[in-house]
Image (cartoon, grey):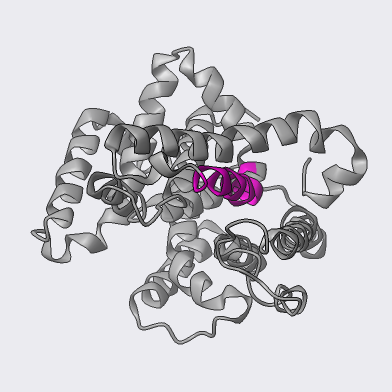
């Protein structure tokens, strides 16, 4: 099957935004807080959209139980492995260094039904439930029909419990199913790809600006969808442009799952070091940029190194962290 290059680029952009979004220290300048707020309007919906589209584009006709077993290996085994590792690291280091969201010994039990090691792990639980449900809808029409209750679930008040991240599943199913439906009906909606990327990006930028200035009214409801459209338009443009930067983005994309699993751990180590250097936290914008570059860089680059030169080398670590 032909590789979905634009989705690889989108995944790379998205995971970088996730890492940036998870670094917002108390001494962040206002402009950086604004960037953080913009990222949070669309980055996880984009991840869900891409997951739904890629799921449909790569879907194979295998028995339901075999499909779920693959997802257990890909999602839940790494979730448990990373949770246990992160909780252990936090327990061992919290008396000697700054630890964000400290844990207790009971966290080893709580991780079985809550993202106890780090809230960001909700994504894996939510994605698991989507893969449990989606294969039951076997035709294009049935999947299009599932989009309707997904929209309803998204816009009604949360009523599902937090356990097993069912509440997050309720809010995110609509984006996953939007990706599924867009893949199913890509021929019918191909006219969207003819809209210039600059036009979509410009409209998204205007909408985000209005939202930041509290001038958007209900426009905030559209931002996740505009963000998805904008990043996909940018990714398609970059694929056609075929610049050398795409090669670096392909590296990031190929390690995106490991970056997601481990970025907060490496960011945490970097933050612990940075917080011990007083002049980095004195409010100077230039120093803050260096600070953020170091922390975010560690969150992206260190997991890539871990993936390529350690985890990808043995069958045991491949199984433990859901690597193909």
- Up-down relation of residue 81 to residue 269 (above or below): below
**Picture coordinates of residue 279 (x, y %)?**
39, 40
Camera-side residue: 282 or 85?
Answer: 282
Say left or right for 291 vs 112.
left
- Up-down relation of residue 34 to residue 83 (above or below): above
Secondary structure predominantly adopted by residues drawn in magenta? helix
Q: Please identify the residue farthest to the front as the structure is shown.
A: 278
Residue at image position (85%, 48%) is 319
Quadrant, the C terminus: top right
**Picture coordinates of residue 295 (x, y %)?**
51, 40
Camera-side residue: 103 or 151?
Answer: 103
The magenta region covers: 259-276
Q: Is residue 76 visible?
A: yes
**Picture coordinates of residue 171 (x, y %)?**
44, 70
Quadrant housing residue 1: top right
Residue at image position (24%, 45%) is 31
Tag count:
0
* Residue 3 part of the magenta-drawn span: no
* Residue 261 part of the magenta-drawn span: yes
Say left or right for 104 vs 41.
right
**Picture coordinates of residue 151 (x, y %)?**
38, 70
Residue at image position (64%, 62%) is 131
């Amino acid at each position: 099957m032909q590789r979905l290059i634009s989705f690889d680029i989108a995944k790379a952009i998205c995971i970088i935004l996730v890492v940036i979004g998870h670094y917002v220290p108390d001494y962040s300048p206002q402009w950086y807080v604004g960037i953080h707020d913009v990222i949070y309007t669309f980055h996880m919906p984009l991840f869900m959209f891409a997951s739904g589209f890629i799921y449909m584009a790569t879907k194979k006709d295998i028995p339901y139980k075999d499909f779920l077993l693959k997802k257990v290996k890909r999602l839940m085994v790494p979730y448990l492995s990373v949770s246990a590792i992160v909780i252990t690291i936090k327990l061992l280091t919290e008396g000697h260094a700054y630890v964000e969201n400290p844990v207790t010994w009971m966290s080893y039990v709580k991780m079985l039904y809550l993202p106890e090691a780090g809230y960001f792990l909700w994504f894996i639980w939510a994605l698991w439930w989507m893969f449990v449900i989606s294969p039951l809808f076997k035709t294009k029409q049935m999947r299009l029909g599932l989009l309707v209750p997904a929209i309803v679930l998204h816009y009604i008040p949360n009523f599902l419990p937090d356990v097993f991240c069912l509440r997050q599943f309720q809010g995110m199913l609509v984006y996953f199913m939007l990706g599924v439906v867009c893949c199913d009906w890509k021929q019918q909606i191909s006219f969207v790809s003819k809209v210039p990327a600059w036009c979509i990006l410009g409209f998204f930028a205007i909408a985000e600006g209005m939202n930041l200035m509290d001038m958007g009214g209900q426009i905030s409801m559209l931002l996740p969808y505009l963000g998805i459209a904008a990043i996909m338009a940018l990714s398609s443009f970059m694929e056609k442009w075929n610049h050398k930067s795409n090669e670096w983005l392909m590296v990031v994309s190929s390690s995106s799952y490991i970056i997601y699993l481990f970025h907060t751990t490496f960011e945490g180590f970097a933050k612990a070091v940075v917080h011990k250097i007083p002049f980095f936290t004195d409010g100077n914008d230039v120093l803050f940029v260096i600070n953020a570059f170091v922390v975010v860089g560690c969150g992206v680059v260190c997991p890539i190194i871990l993936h390529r030169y350690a985890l990808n080398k043995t069958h045991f670590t491949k199984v433990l962290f859901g690597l193909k």
